[in-house]
Amino acid sequence: QVQLVESGGGLVQPGGSLRLSCAASGTIFRRYVMGWYREAPGKQRELVATITHGGTTNYADSVKGRFTISRDNAKNTVYLQMNSLKREDTAVYYCNAESTVVAGLQSWGQGTQVTISS
């Protein structure tokens, strides 16, 4: 089972930027599609972005053009660069690892709070 530890959340003004990091351990990193999800108060957890080992990315429409997901396979780390942040981006952001080898096998990080407010 992969262990995931997120960092980089915080409070930022609208229009600002943040970069989230997620370090993975305890597994073979290349065997996982990595992703970021978020959960806002009173809402369901939703996909933000995913990235395969080869670098293929997928984004929610709401963040296209503003967020960039990337991964450093040598460091077993995935990043989420968030620019032009909006109040509606406020949420707890969770890192996710989904196995490409075992169907349905996935792990979640503990979450990091991102708050957009002036």
Image (cartoon, rainbow, N blue to C red):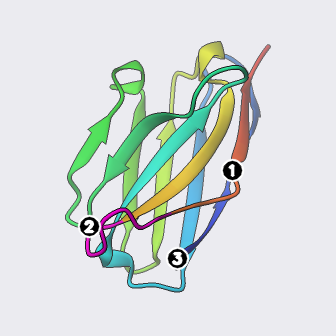
Is 53 on the left-hand or right-hand side of 108? left
Q: Is residue 108 above or below residue 101?
A: above
Tell which of 24 and 104 is nearer to you: 104
Which quadrant holds the C terminus?
top right
Separation of marks 1 and 2 at Cα, in angstroms: 22 Å
Question: Which numbered disc, 1 or 2, marks the residue closer to the eye?
Answer: 1
Tell which of 101 and 8 is nearer to you: 101
Question: Which numbered disc, 3 or 2, marks the residue closer to the eye?
Answer: 3
Position in image of residue 1 (x %, y %)? 52, 79
Residue type marked 1: Gly
Residue under the point 58% across and 27% down? 44
Q: Is residue 66 above or below residue 107?
A: above
Residue type marked 2: His
Residue type marked 3: Val
Q: Are marks 1 and 3 in contact (CB under 8 Å)?
A: no
Residue under the point 36% across and 28% down? 60
Quick one: label 3 or label 2, which is nearer the N terminus?
Answer: 3
Position in image of residue 55 (x %, y %)? 23, 58
Graded by Cα atoms within 10 Å as few (under 14), some (14 to 19) or many (20 or more), the crowding at tag 2 reads some
Q: Which residue is under mark 3?
A: 2
**Stretch in magenta:** 99-106
Q: Which residue is under mark 2?
A: 53
Is 83 on the left-hand or right-hand side of 60? right
Quick one: label 1 or label 2, which is nearer the N terminus?
Answer: 2
